Image: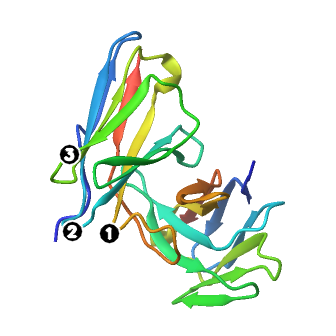
Amino acid sequence: DAGVTQSPTHLIKTRGQHVTLRCSPISGHKSVSWYQQVLGQGPQFIFQYYEKEERGRGNFPDRFSARQFPNYSSELNVNALLLGDSALYLCASRITQGTGYPYEQYFGPGTRLTVT
Amino acid sequence: TQLLEQSPQFLSIQEGENLTVYCNSSSVFSSLQWYRQEPGEGPVLLVTVVTGGEVKKLKRLTFQFGDARKDSSLHITAAQTGDTGLYLCAGPTSGSARQLTFGSGTQLTVLP
């Protein structure tokens, strides 16, 4: 079975531009989360979506937005890019939104965004 | 704010040696997870520990959750070059089990 897929793999943008990153969850998984991983740090939570609704939001500015489609795939959008947005953006999928424990989430390979 | 501190930040050892990496917090976590991340890939879940004092073994890897559920350790016996990677601990963010708080990781390099 295919794992979590993300596109594109790498992306170079200029400050002030807009970027859209895409994620397809594992078949049957309805929850998608987005994380930002800056070089040398652990991933930081950005959003969680379940059944097309935002269910969680991390401490990120409004320049970051996301949505989930009926097929459970998701897009992360970042407007007015800053140099500090350069990072690996990870998508993770889960079967449910799972407020209980235990649960497992599976990460994709990420999109490496470089802002110049 | 919940923080997870991992130590050491970098570790380079010879194949066959043993090692321990640590994950500490001043906050209580209901559970902690350990992930390994290799270059160009996303983190892969290794184990979840739930009960204070719990010890779990995964082949040559031994994971322990502190009695107070504020810390955890990962011990690798007879390290192999394939163990090279970034080891991350993570726990549910207080107030929202939907989010994970990650530590900054330990970058392990096992030399042949």
Residue positioned 67% across, 73% down in the render: B30
> Residue A95, labelled with which disc?
1
Q: Secondary structure at mark 3?
A: loop
Side of B68 where B79 appears, left or right: left
Asked if badge 3 and badge 2 are on a common chain, one would say yes
Please give the residue where the numbered disc 3 appears in the rendered image: A69
Residue B51: quadrant of the picture:
bottom right
C-alpha distance separating marks 2 and 1: 6 Å
* Local crowd size for mark 1, using a 10 Å CA cut-off: few (<14), some (14–19), many (≥20): some
Where does the image place residue A115, in percent across and percent down from the top left?
41, 19
* Local crowd size for mark 2, using a 10 Å CA cut-off: few (<14), some (14–19), many (≥20): few
Q: Which colouring convention does the figure follow?
A: rainbow
User: Mark 1 near mark 3, Cβ–Cβ under 8 Å?
Assistant: no
Q: Nearer the viewer, residue B85 or B18?
A: B85
Q: Nearer the viewer, residue B54 or A93?
A: A93
Residue A116 versus residue B20 in the image, above or below = above
Where does the image place residue B95, in percent across and percent down from the top left?
65, 57
- Say which amino acid is labelled 3: Phe
